[in-house]
Image: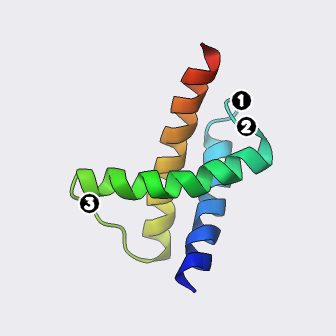
Amino acid sequence: MSFIYFLLIGLAAGWLAGQLTKGSGFGTVGNLVIGIIGALLGGVMFKLVGLAAYGLLGNLVMSTIGAVALLLILQAVKKK
């Protein structure tokens, strides 16, 4: 069940990240995939700074931050 929960949070985070970074997305499907990868990145980023996310809202915020960071990095690489 936790894997499905992770995927759903990642999908929601990808959609939110796409909305927050208008014009820098990779389409709906691309943003959703980036959201899942961003959820992992967000977890790593939070652990590096000593933060923890609890509950649905905390995990969604953490995953969205990771997805936005990943979208911005990919946008910078894509422009080169």
Q: Amino acid at mark 3?
A: Leu
| Residue at the spot of label 2 | 26
57 sits to left or right of 47 = right
From the image, which quarter does the N terminus lie in?
bottom right
Q: What residue appears at the point 23 percent right and 51 percent down from the top-left corner?
A: 49
| Residue at the spot of label 1 | 23
Query: Coloring scheme of the render?
Result: rainbow
Residue most extreme to the top: 80
The Cα atoms of the two marked residues, 2 and 3, are separated by: 29 Å
SS under mark 2: loop
Q: Residues within 10 Å of mark 2 (few under 14, many from 20)?
A: some
Q: Residues within 10 Å of mark 1 (few under 14, many from 20)?
A: few
| Residue at the spot of label 3 | 51
Tell me: residue 22, above or below residue 61: above
Report x, y in % for residue 43: 39, 59
Residue most extreme to the bottom: 1
Report x, y in % for residue 38: 52, 51
From the image, which quarter does the C terminus lie in?
top right
Disc number lying in front (1 or 2):
2
Q: In terms of depth relative to the viewer, which is nearer, 5 or 13?
A: 5
Which image quadrant for residue 18? Answer: top right
Q: Amino acid at mark 1?
A: Gly
Q: What residue appears at the point 55 percent right and 53 percent down from the top-left corner?
A: 37
